Image (tube, helix red, strand yellow):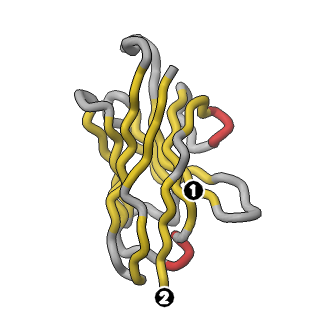
Amino acid sequence: QVQLVESGGGSVQTGGSLRLSCQASLSVPEDRYKSRYRGWFRQTPGKQREGVALIARGGLTLYESSVQGRFTISQDNAKNIVYLDMNNLKPNDTAMYYCGQGTALTLDPNYYSFWGQGTQVTVSA
């Protein structure tokens, strides 16, 4: 089992920056021979959850096109923390941001089995 806890959300103005963190806690040691992807997703009321960025255990990253060049995902494997640095934030980045863990190289949230509770990001004009 994996528990994920997000932090770092808040309210900023357009053009501002935020850093989200996702702390993972594992009940058993990871099988390092299995694929593992941790990603950031976001959701607004009435809409489906969408993938923003993911990072593989080895460091491979993938971004949704609207955040490419503005957001950076990184990780500290020793501490089991994944970060999302968000720069040049825009009002349509406003959403609840979730951390997820899965075993497929995809931003489709259906392939993620473990989720955190989310952290709210609000960007005002």
Quarter holding residue 55:
top left
Please tell me which residue is depicted at 37% across the width and 38% down the height of the picture. 23
Which residue is under mark 2?
Answer: 125
Please tell me which residue is depicted at 33% across the width and 71% down the height of the picture. 17
* Residue 84 locus on image (x, y percent): 37, 53
Quarter holding residue 22:
top left
* Residue 99 locus on image (x, y percent): 49, 44
Residue type at numbered disc 1:
Arg
Quarter holding residue 13:
bottom left
Q: Helix, strand, or loop for circle 2?
A: loop
Give the class, few, some or many, for how many residues have Cα within 10 Å of label 1's Cα (few <14, many ≥20). many
Which residue is under mark 1?
Answer: 42
Residue type at numbered disc 2:
Ala
- Residue 41 higher or lower than 25, as above or below: below
- Residue 27 higher or lower than 100, as above or below: above
Which of the pair 5/125 is nearer the observer? Answer: 5
